[in-house]
Image (cartoon, rainbow, N blue to C red):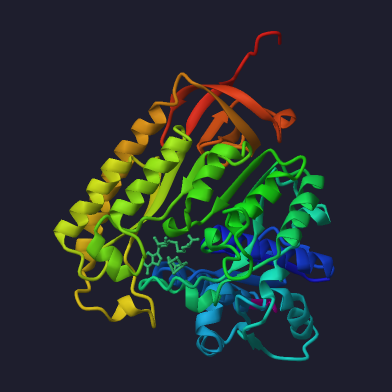
């Protein structure tokens, strides 16, 4: 049987989609190749959120296809995901080596289509149709097929987004919000526990909008909070997280859940995008900075040690120095633990791309550097406050940067590196934090009384 290599660009949702495709292909008898060069099938799961992400995938495809031609290989190349969805058949026209283009609602067809291509029944296949129920198809994990244990498991609970932020391409590439039933999500989490998971992260583009049209509030609790309760009740799961929420989906029921559900980790990634109300309105974000700050206050009242991270865009069309200053002010006021910061990138067919006042790259670059400075300084201070403390971590495996050391994450979502070994894998353990690196903590396993 052929071997397959899948490379993923972009967010955790994309990583999860790629895993589901890999599991589907493994079930069909494909084995996973160690590198793109040695694979019979190479799939790039793409991201469209910024132009740079698209250019990276296109560049990679060009490079791999050229190598394949040079060595007279006959690998099959395909694009999956967001860029496949938005560019469709154009991708095959532009890059004739590409033989499969699979949109965001068609991941579950990958094996069938590859069979067609491998057996030479078709030259190329493009499928970017919408499909009712496609949100229910992202459920298989590689662990079920003997893959590596995932201490922390990612579970996709919904697809799509209806918010239509004016800068964002996601509603066009991922379609309308569609949610999976609570029972199916819980069942998937149970299966993952059997396979060794101790933590679950619930994934969606706008995760706290979960099932808001399909399911009713019960006892003042939104469907998302009902889901958090159901997942928390799964025996064997020690920690529950979710990403990415939207500030406006943070009702009091969700804030209250942080204080009430012991497994729900005290960490939240809440994209704010800008500190200027004028820009937030142009972005169609649906909240003001005052509302955002109020939410931060409530979350910190519920869990004083909550870790807060965010996304910020600089250089949105029409952003003045004064608007940008307000973003800096907000960042200083909230004191985020960390942030993902982006230069605004015009995306085709989004309203912001046609707005007046597009800014030059120099202006965006300058603002990004200034924001980075503020975020990094405050982040370092926030990490520094952990030094000297004893914190609980869940050990995830060898550290990515230095595989001789091990790493885990605190409940507030900070990485801690320590001297560990295989016997620590999957353990919840206390560590004494000794030092702060760059957005990484270092610690020693705590010697507990009576040990
Ligand atoms: N809710 C989604 C958001 C997807 S995009 C999620 O799961 O993360 C992730 C981040 O990319 C956004 O929060 C935003 O800060 C940034 N982004 C989206 N579109 C962008 C654009 N056109 N230019 C620059 N950054 C963008
Ligand atoms: Fe994009 Fe806004 Fe939805 S950032 S994913 S349109 S909440």
Q: Which residue, as the protein is rendered here, is positioned at the far front?
A: 219
Quadrant (top left/top right/bottom left/bottom right) for the C terminus: top right
Residue toward you, 233 or 413: 233
The residue sitting at 47% across, 37% down in the picture is 302
State the count of labels.
0
- Can you see residue 147? no
Ligand 1's quadrant: bottom left
> Where is 243 relative to 178, above or below?
above
* Residue 95 x/y as whole percent: 53, 84
Q: Quadrant of residue 341?
A: bottom left
> Where is 375 relative to 77, above or below?
above
The residue sitting at 33% across, 40% down in the picture is 335
Residue toward you, 213 or 178: 213
Q: Is residue 26 left or right of 310 when viewed as pictured?
A: right
Q: Quadrant of residue 213?
A: bottom right
> Is 339 contained in the magenta span?
no
Magenta region, main secondary structure: loop
- Can you see residue 386? yes
- Residue interval drawn in magenta: 73-77
């Amino acid at each position: 049987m052929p071997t397959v290599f899948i490379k993923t660009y972009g967010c955790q949702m994309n990583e999860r989609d790629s895993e589901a495709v890999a599991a589907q292909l493994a079930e069909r008898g494909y084995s996973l190749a160690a590198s793109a060069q040695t694979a019979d099938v190479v799939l790039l799961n793409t991201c469209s959120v910024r132009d740079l992400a698209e250019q990276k995938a296109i560049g990679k495809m060009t490079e791999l296809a050229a190598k394949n031609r040079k060595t007279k290989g006959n690998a099959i190349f395909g694009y999956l995901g967001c860029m496949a969805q938005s560019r469709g058949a154009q991708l095959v026209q532009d890059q004739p080596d590409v033989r499969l283009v699979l949109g965001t609602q068609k991941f579950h067809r990958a094996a069938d289509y590859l069979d067609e291509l491998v057996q030479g029944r078709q030259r190329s296949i493009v499928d970017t149709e919408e499909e009712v129920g496609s949100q229910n198809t992202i459920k298989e994990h590689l662990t079920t097929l003997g893959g590596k244990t995932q201490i922390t498991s990612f579970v996709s609970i919904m697809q799509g987004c209806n918010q239509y932020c004016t800068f964002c391409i996601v509603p066009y590439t991922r379609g309308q919000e569609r949610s999976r039933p609570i029972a199916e999500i819980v069942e998937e989490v149970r299966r993952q526990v059997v396979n060794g998971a101790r933590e679950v992260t619930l994934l969606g583009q706008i995760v706290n909008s979960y099932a808001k049209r399909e399911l009713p509030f019960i006892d003042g609790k939104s469907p998302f909070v009902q889901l958090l309760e159901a997942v928390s009740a799964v025996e064997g799961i020690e920690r529950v997280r979710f990403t990415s929420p939207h500030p406006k989906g943070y009702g009091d029921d969700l804030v209250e859940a942080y204080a009430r559900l012991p497994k729900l980790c005290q960490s939240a990634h809440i994209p704010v995008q800008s500190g200027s109300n004028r820009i937030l309105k142009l972005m169609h974000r649906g909240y003001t900075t005052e509302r955002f700050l109020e939410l931060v206050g409530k979350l910190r009242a519920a869990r004083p040690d909550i870790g807060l991270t965010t996304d910020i865009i600089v250089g949105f069309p029409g952003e003045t120095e004064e608007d940008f200053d307000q973003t800096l002010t907000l960042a200083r006021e909230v004191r985020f633990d960390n942030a993902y910061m982006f230069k605004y990138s015009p995306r085709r067919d989004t309203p912001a791309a046609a707005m007046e006042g597009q800014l030059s790259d120099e202006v965006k670059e300058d603002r990004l550097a200034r924001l980075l400075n503020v975020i990094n300084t405050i982040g370092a201070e926030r990490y520094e406050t952990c030094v000297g403390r004893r914190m609980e971590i869940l050990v995830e495996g060898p550290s990515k940067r230095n595989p001789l050391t091990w790493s885990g994450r605190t409940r507030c979502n900070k990485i801690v590196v320590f001297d560990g070994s295989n016997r620590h894998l999957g353990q919840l353990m206390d560590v004494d934090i000794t030092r702060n690196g760059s957005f990484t903590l270092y610690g020693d396993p705590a010697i507990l009384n009576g040990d």
